[in-house]
């Protein structure tokens, strides 16, 4: 999966129920910003407006807006991705 993550800029997860978000954690470790619905374990995987956007379940305006913002403003997307990588490394106790 690392080559898949490295080929992207944003990881999007839309769900109404989630447990531990290994895919979001792996994607952020590869410096991808995230856009996800704030359900289950998603809140612990990222930080809204820092590592990307976490939207409310059923918010049919915020989700497409967040995807659009992340996919069109490259500098913002990159900054969120770098913060996401630091968040994952700090949370997991890893250095790097």
Image (cartoon, rainbow, N blue to C red):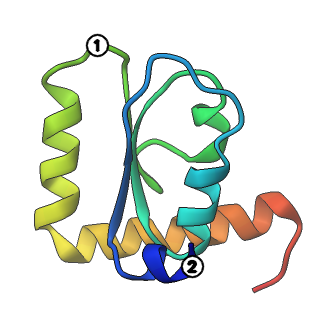
Q: Nearer the viewer, residue 60 or 1?
A: 1
Quadrant of the image containing the N terminus:
bottom right
Dot 2: what SS? helix
Location of residue 85 (image quadrant): bottom right
Q: CA distance from mark 1 to mark 2?
A: 30 Å
Q: Do tag 1 and tag 2 residues touch (Cβ < 8 Å)? A: no
Q: Is residue 6 left or right of residue 55?
A: right
Residue 93: x and y in percent read 89, 67
Q: Any mark on residue 2, and which?
A: 2
Q: Is residue 88 above or below residue 63?
A: below
Q: Residue at x 62, y 22 (%)?
A: 40
Q: How many marks?
A: 2
Question: Mark 1 or 2, which is nearer the eye?
Answer: 2
Q: Any mark on residue 49, and which?
A: none
Mark 1 or mark 2, earlier in chain: 2
Location of residue 60 (image quadrant): top left
Residue 36: x and y in percent read 41, 38
Q: Residue at x 17, y 62 (%)?
A: 71
Q: Nearer the viewer, residue 22 or 85?
A: 22
Quadrant of the image containing the C terminus:
bottom right
Where is mark 1, residue-wise? 58
Q: Is residue 13 left or right of residue 58?
A: right
Location of residue 87 (image quadrant): bottom right
Residue 91: x and y in percent read 79, 57
């Amino acid at each position: 999966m690392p080559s898949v993550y490295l080929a992207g800029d944003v990881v999007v997860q839309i769900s109404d129920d989630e447990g531990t978000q290994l895919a979001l954690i792996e994607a952020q470790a590869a410096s991808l910003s995230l856009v996800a619905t704030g359900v289950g374990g998603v809140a612990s995987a990222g930080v809204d407006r820092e590592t990307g956007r976490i939207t409310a379940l059923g918010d049919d305006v915020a989700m497409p807006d967040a995807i659009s913002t992340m996919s069109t403003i490259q500098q913002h997307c990159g900054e969120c991705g770098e913060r996401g990588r630091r968040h994952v490394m700090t949370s997991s106790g890893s250095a790097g």
